[in-house]
Image: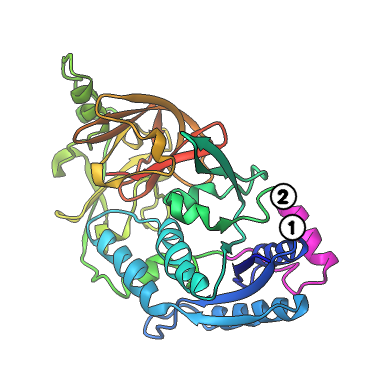
Amino acid sequence: MKRVVVGLSGGVDSSVAAYLLQQQGYEVIGLFMKNWHDDSVTISNECPWLEDSNDALLVAEKLGIPFQTVDLSEQYKEKIVDYMFAEYEKGRTPNPDVLCNREIKFDVFMKIALSLGADYVATGHYCRKGETEVDGKTVYQLLSGADNNKDQSYFLCQLSQEQLAKALFPIGELTKPEVRQIAAEMDLVTAEKKDSQGLCFIGKVRLPEFLQQKLQPKEGIIIQVDKDDAVFSIAKPETDSVESALAFEAAKLPFGEAQGKVVGKHQGAHYFTNGQRKGLGVGGTTEPLFIIATDVDRNIVYTGLGSEHPGLFRKALFVNPSEVHWIREDMALQDGQTLEVMARIRYRQPLQKATLHQFENGMYVSFDEPQSAITEGQFVAWYHDDELLGSGVIS
């Protein structure tokens, strides 16, 4: 009998995942990960992890499976939280959920599960796992979830073949309403529970407040750049080199202080991210202001009026060679090769037509349509049909 350790989070998805595995004849063990107990960072008066671990315990009792809690807060702080602050200080916007899957659930947690004699680790993610054969070897595939509204394959875009080999996603074929229905029929305490928001596993953290407690505020100016500014009509260099043409399309625009008018002040450029429109505190504009760029060295936030402002859009992005990751290692591109794919630069974004261009010094992803708010530090993930082939950190 194969043994599976399920990451029980206290939510409905992992509860139903555990139940389905039990139905499929696996020996199931429930494990709750405690990843946060730093009281110096105020989150809210509620104690979400206590409530969640209690719900996870009740589900395990209901299903009659062994249950224990593991405290991974030290590794979580080191691998996720410290990394996040370092990225924000550099003016990049990290994605803690993608990292949490790569570094915690399918690494630290997986090692604990395997030490308990598990054959697999299962989570309540809305995605599916496939298998294919390449040169006589089994290759694992990460496929999008059957529920288009809830597909979470993007969050697993950094997994490796070794991690996928040991992973199971029991609810990947189901839709959220079906999952809730199973939980209700089984009378699980989590059936009606709202989906958790906020950082993976920290619970109800509001990011700006969280950042402000760790990153020092420093006052700077907010500049509004006119949509007809000359910076948006810099001529594309005439070149036969595909690489330099792509580099031009992926480059950040050279904004300067004289680029527009000062419309307000902020408390630190590192708190803000491209495409953001809330939290600027600038009123009286005909349309909302959107952040089009931040400069953490000079502590300036650049904004533009309206969601169609040219400062928001770029046709290409760049990924450093060390940050190009292929789940399908057998499909990795070599220098000079290209591949037509569908790609997304954030969770829930509809897939966009794009082409990967691999060069010795990194990869460019060029989109058929200009993309809004391409953000450094976030992940671009590329797909063929419903298979996620690889991903990279936007540079």
Q: Residue 187: which quarter of the image? A: bottom right
Residue 216 percent coordinates (x, y): 23, 71
Disc 2: which residue? 175
In the image, residue 93 above or below residue 40 = above
Disc 1: which residue? 179
User: Which residue shows up at 59% across the image and 62% down it?
Assistant: 122
Residue 310 percent coordinates (x, y): 34, 31
Per the image, label 1 sits on a secondary structure element best described as helix
Is residue 294 part of the magenta span, yes or no?
A: no
Q: How many marks?
A: 2
Is residue 185 part of the magenta span, yes or no?
A: yes
Res 320 seen here: no
Q: How crowded is the residue under tag 2: few (<14 C-alpha within 10 Å), some, or many (20+)?
A: some
Alpha-carbon distance for marks 2 and 1?
A: 6 Å
Residue 153 percent coordinates (x, y): 53, 48
User: Which residue shows up at 16% across the image and 19% down it?
Assistant: 237
Label 1 sits on what residue type? Val
- The residues colored magenta run 174-196
User: Which residue shows up at 65% across the image and 77% down it?
Assistant: 56
Q: Residue 181: which quarter of the image? A: bottom right
Question: Which residue extends farthest front?
Answer: 136
Q: Residue 3: which quarter of the image? A: bottom right
User: Which residue shows up at 37% across the image and 79% down it?
Assistant: 74
Label 2 sits on what residue type? Thr
Res 19 seen here: yes
Per the image, label 2 sits on a secondary structure element best described as loop
Question: Which residue extends farthest right?
Answer: 185
Left or right, 70 with respect to 247, comes to right
Left or right, 192 with respect to 143, comes to right
